[in-house]
Amino acid sequence: MCVSLGDGVSLLVNAGYGGSNCLFIEDDRQVLVETGGGRALSEIKPESVDLIINTHRHIDHVKGNGLFPRAKVCVHSRERASMDDVALVAASGGWSHLMEGGFQDHMDEFPVDPTLLYTQRPVHGTLADGQVIDCGKTRMEILHTPGHTAGHCSVFLPEEEILFTGDICLTAVGPNYADPDADIDDLMASIDRLIALKPRAMVTSHSKKVCNGSSAEVLAEFRGRIFQREERILDAIKEHPSDIHSLASQRLIYPKHPTRFVLFWEKCMIEKHLVRLEKAGMVKGSEEGLWYAA
Ligand SMILES: [Zn+2]
Ligand SMILES: [Zn+2]
């Protein structure tokens, strides 16, 4: 499905699981933001794309990069080193200390065809905060919005007042900060920065909706979920000193754990909250891995 957002600017909405929406600028220079659109990408002639921008390195956003033979691929410098790193793409950073067995044993539950993880994806250039990409009529501004990953970027079209927020995803299950390079405080600061923009239209890599006019409220609610999760974790520890596994089993972040990867992401995010709460002097951990209210 293709949704027009303005003259020469459209959102290709991904229908399946394990992919991403893509922003397409049809101009003197044809620019595609993300390539995880699956069948939605069939709307584009492969030879016509000049530039691909990936908001970050996750497989659901980059998996179609190879479909556009002429396109130069750009990603933020803090992502670039790991674009081809299978272990990081699979978010296996903390698997060995949080989960039993190897993540490779559960790849049948991974949301993306695992063979795609082993595809080499060249990167031709890097993105930096404030960089302006001139497409012809349309100008595109890169906003470095870390938190989901260290190099995550959003894209703003200042004349059209269109904002593409990448994996600041605004879906019912977000936000996600499970990546080894994710950071809760960075994510909150990035959302604050986007709140101040007040675009006419806001779209994301995963939400099917176009947010018209109410972006500040929608983003503030999304940001507020981080505090709600932290409250739930703190309340659970106050009620009962717990280790990370028993906290995760209480589903304080995700209402369900349909795959082991979702359980893993829950544990990664709880761990980041515990570090944050410990820094604030609100919890303390024991050598046996139990967490107590301080
Ligand atoms: Zn992501
Ligand atoms: Zn994503």
Image: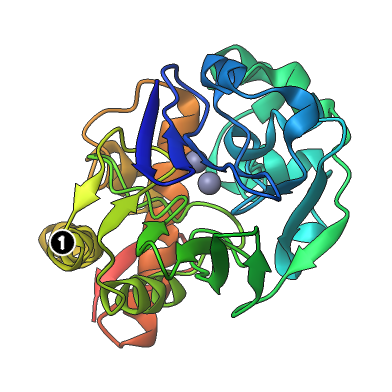
> Closer to the camera, 4 or 275?
4
Q: Residues within 10 Å of mark 1 (few under 14, many from 20)?
A: few
Whether label 1 lies within 8 Å of ligand 1 gets the answer no
Colour mapping used in the image:
rainbow
Amino acid under disc 1: Gln
Tell me where residue 208 appears, x and y as whole percent.
30, 32
Mark 1 sits on what residue?
A: 228
Count of picture labels = 1
Q: Is residue 232 left or right of residue 1?
A: left
Quadrant location of the C terminus in the rendered image: bottom left
> Closer to the camera, 159 or 192?
159
Quadrant location of the N terminus in the rendered image: top left
Residue drawn at 70 percent across, 41 percent down: 89
Tell me where residue 119 appears, x and y as whole percent.
84, 28
Q: Is residue 189 left or right of residue 113?
A: left
> Closer to the camera, 40 or 110?
40
Q: What element does badge 1 sit on?
A: helix
Say above or below: 128 vs 288: below
The answer to which quarter of the image holds residue 14 is: top left
> Closer to the camera, 229 or 161?
161
Q: Is residue 33 left or right of residue 232?
A: right
Residue drawn at 39 percent across, 59 percent down: 163
Say above or below: 167 vs 259: below
Residue drawn at 66 percent across, 66 percent down: 133
Say above or below: 185 vs 71: below
Tell me where residue 86 appears, x and y as whole percent.
79, 38
Tell me where residue 62 appears, x and y as whole percent.
68, 38
